[in-house]
Image (spheres, helix red, strand yellow):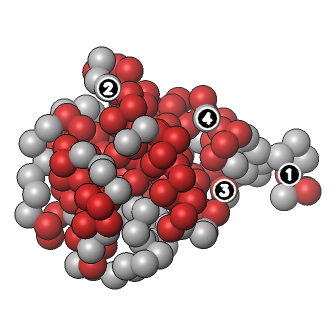
Amino acid sequence: MTRDEAWAVVCEFVQSEGLRRHMLGVEACMLAYAAKFHADQETWAVTALLHDFDWELHPSLPDHPTRGEPILAERGVSEEIRQAILSHADFTGVPRDSLLRKTLFACDELSGFLSACAYVKPRKSIFEVDVPSVKRKLKDKAFARAVNRDDITRGAGELGVPLDEHIAFCIEAMKARASCLGLEGVADPSLA
């Protein structure tokens, strides 16, 4: 499956603009890591885009992502990508034993958290987000409470990247795609 075909699947199954942007945010981070690790960018992009494609169909665990996997199989998505998607949920029992699987897990919760951090900045921009402010927000359990902080920390650890470095890397990746993520910001904060 190509990146464009994966995006078509996302648009077919996902109506929420926020969820689509989340998948694009994960894609931005994963593509940056694919370049760093000299991995296949198309495979990593498809994996990122499809990892939550079934969330609106199956919004509770353990249905997501397990009940979405057969849909992807029917669509011709490779075993490698389907297993990586399954591995981003601990309860599936699919080990994160490849760089693709580890990176998806490491980027999933963090990219969503970085978006939340950007939305509360005066200009609502990823360009205002830095590592110290993210670390402070991680300690604030009331902020973006649906984000699993342990997954963010564990994801960086499983990837073998220090947390601060991982946060900084993903911020930069998301800055490069700020416009399509809706994180480029507003010129006048009073207009936000």
Disc 2 element: loop
Marks 4, 3: nearer the viewer: 4
Residue at 76% of width from left, 44% of height from top? 185
Residue 106 at x, y = what percent? 30, 46
Q: In this view, does 26 lie above or below 38?
A: below
Q: Do the residues labelled 4 and 1 touch (CB within 8 Å)?
A: no
Q: How far apart are marks 4 and 1 (CA)?
A: 21 Å
Q: Mark 2 or mark 3: which is in front? A: 2
Three-letter code for the amino acid on which mark 1 is drawn: Pro
Horizontal side, residue 127 vs residue 45: left or right: right
Q: How crowded is mark 3: few (under 14 residues within 10 Å), some or many (20 or more)?
A: some
| Amino acid marked by disc 3 | Tyr
Q: Earlier in the sequence, mark 1 or mark 2?
A: 2
Mark 2 and mark 3: span between their CA atoms? 31 Å
Considering the image in quadrants, where does the C terminus appear? bottom right
Residue indicated by mark 1: 189
